[in-house]
Structures are given as structure tokens and as C-alpha cells.
Image (cartoon, rainbow, N blue to C red):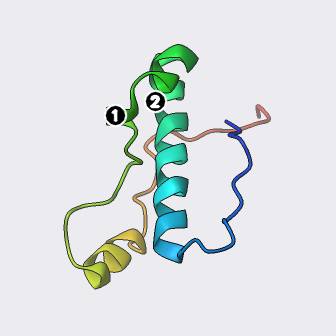
Amino acid sequence: MRYGRPLTPEPDESTGTFNGRLEDEVGRLWVEHDEGWWASMHSPGRRRAPRGPDASEWRRKWESTSPTPPSSRHHRIWRR
């Protein structure tokens, strides 16, 4: 789990602008996870939060609600 700095909307900031700042910060945390803190602070061009497929909104929602296939491995906590 990663924690970034707290974000608060500015008094005259629009929702779209705030969402852009939020997306940039989530992308920075993603780069920090993959490449480390230093790279995340010095690579603003790579700070893009992961997104779903390039499709219309209804198709992304439809795909995200599809059931996941059952796992091929069976995990048991207690042995028999």
C-alpha cells in the first residue's frame, strides 16, 4: 500500500482540474512502486495512472463486471 500526500481542492478549482491533479499523484505513486521514490519525483512525463481499455464507458463497465475465472490452484489453510 502506498500513501501520497493529502490532496485538497483549491477554493476556485474545478472538478476536472482537481481530478487531473489526483490522476497525476496516483501515477506518481505507480511509478514509485515500479521504479522507486527518486524516479517518481523526477519523471513527470511518466506519471500516468493506469487506465482500462480504450473503449466507450459502457464497454469498460461491462468488462469490469465480468466474473473472474476460477483459480487453477486450490489454496487450503489447514491440511487434512
Figure quadrant of residue 22: bottom right
Q: Are discs 2 and 1 less than 8 Å apart at CB?
A: yes
Figure quadrant of residue 61: bottom left
State the residue lying farthest toward the front.
12
Q: What residue type is labelled 1?
A: Arg
Question: Which disc number belongs to residue 46?
Answer: 1
Q: What residue type is labelled 2?
A: Val
Question: Which disc number belongs to residue 31?
Answer: 2
Q: In this view, does 15 lie to the left or right of 4?
A: left
Q: Where is residue 68 in the image (x, y as percent from the top left)?
A: 42, 61
Figure quadrant of residue 75: top right
In space, the residues marked 2 and 1 are separated at their CA atoms by: 7 Å
Position above or below: 65 against 24 = below
Please report whichever mark, 2 or 1, sits nearer to the chain's N-terminal start.
2
- Image quadrant in which the N terminus is located: top right
Position above or below: 69 against 50 = below
- Image quadrant in which the C terminus is located: top right
Secondary structure under badge 1?
A: helix
